[in-house]
Amino acid sequence: MWQIRPGLDTIKSYHVPDIAWPVKLDANERAGELPPKVQAAITARLAAIAANRYPEIGQHSLKQALSEGLGLTPGNIAVGNGSSEVLAALCRVFGGPGRKIVYPSPSFSMYPIYCLLADSRPVTVELDAGFVLAPEKVFSTALQEQAALIILCVPNNPTGGAMPPEAIEYVVAGARCPVVVDEAYIDFAGNSVLGLLGKYPNLIVARTFSKAFGLAGARVGYIAASRDIIDLVGKVLLPYDVNAFSLAAAAVAWELRAEFAAGIAATVAERERVAAALKELPAIEVFPSAANFLLVRSARAGELASFLASRNIGVRDFGKAPGLAGCLRVTVGTAAENDAFLAATEKFIRGEV
Ligand SMILES: *Cc1c(COP(=O)(O)O)cnc(C)c1O
């Protein structure tokens, strides 16, 4: 028999159906195409890339642009293939055999995978009723378990709620380990804790270009943290890791970030419109969201997901995930996509099908 790495048999692969839904509300991607100005600038920038050359070894152009915008230095930034890769790198830096990594549940389904791939032990803190995370519980669990790393997801995927900055600061200030705040959806919420980086050397902020910035296909994400942490992450990320095309696309999106403001505001307004319309329906519960998706709960969620699928609308069914029985996550799409979702859902709930 082959000698497979010990522990690999305990890891479930990440599995989502790969369906090109005409109304695709299953992956929290940006609603609609890129702003035309951004699309044109990316196309032009990509055309000028010398593909025979390796990308910049230090990813300096993107780090320089990010750090200027964020009021940091390039040495405070690490870039990866999506924030996924940088989060996984953090688990490799601080985790290892016997090390414990604390994160909430339900939350992002990749956290246990990053954790186990780093041979670390996942320790979950359950959300309370209404999917609220109690900072005291995170604090006391981390202390008790002598956690090596804490991951907070703000706003939390897939529940949508956002821990207030004071609650995050309470955890960061008290923790005896680094705390990474995954801000994948922060552009839809506001209240970033990035401003606390100077005060807490154990704080790490993770961001991505995959959601509000519409570059899910490019796979670029980053963390901002103290130089010490960035240097450690640099040891586990491979050189020339992120390709030149993706680095260039992200740099353009960041330079032109003002172009995304209108789309983000529209998504937030649509989120509130869809939530209000769902609240009018019987037998379906909708949770408050600070992100670009809504979590809904219904006794007939599975059937609803199938009905939506029959109408070419893809949503994410979390019914089998721990703590999420009867829950669907619906990405906020364009107004037309949201209308299609609302019309179909209303038909189903009112029993007209
Ligand atoms: C989408 C997402 C990410 C980032 O994904 P990448 O595409 O790898 O940058 C990170 N955390 C959460 C909670 C997400 O939902």
Image: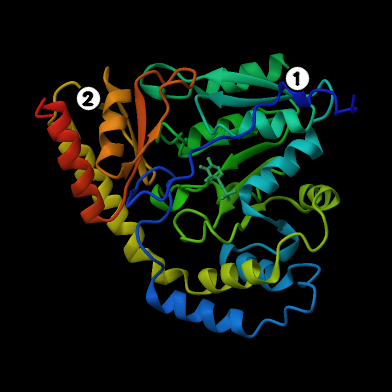
Which comes sooner in the sequence, label 1 or label 2? 1
Q: Is residue 174 left or right of residue 233?
A: left
Q: Quadrant of the C terminus?
A: top left
What crowding class fits label 2: few (fewer than 14 Cα within 10 Å), some (14-19), or many (20 or more)?
Answer: some
Q: Quadrant of residue 14?
A: top right
What crowding class fits label 1: few (fewer than 14 Cα within 10 Å), some (14-19), or many (20 or more)?
Answer: some
Q: Amino acid at mark 2?
A: Ile
The residue at 78%/33% (across/down) is 118
Q: Is residue 128 left or right of residue 282?
A: right
Question: What residue occupies the far top of the structure in this picture?
Answer: 144
Q: Position of residue 107 (x, y in %)?
A: 51, 30
Give the residue pinned by disc 2.
284
Q: Closer to the camera, 130 or 170?
A: 130
Q: Closer to the camera, 253 or 144?
A: 253
Ligand 1 found in image quarter: top right
Label 2 secondary element: loop
Q: Position of residue 196 (x, y in %)?
A: 59, 47
Q: Is residue 25 visible?
A: yes
Measured in 3D between alpha carbons, the distance from the residue under mark 1 to the one under mark 2, in whole angstroms, is 40 Å
Q: Is residue 274 left or right of residue 79?
A: left
Q: Position of residue 50 (x, y in %)?
A: 72, 82
Q: Position of residue 340 (x, y in %)?
A: 20, 47
The residue at 78%/54% (across/down) is 227
Give the residue pinned by disc 1.
146
Q: Amino acid at mark 1?
A: Gln
Above or below — where is 326 with respect to 247?
above
Q: Is residue 120 visible?
A: no
Which of the two marks, 1 or 2, is nearer to us in this view?
2
The residue at 62%/17% (across/down) is 140
Above or below — where is 31 with respect to 314?
below
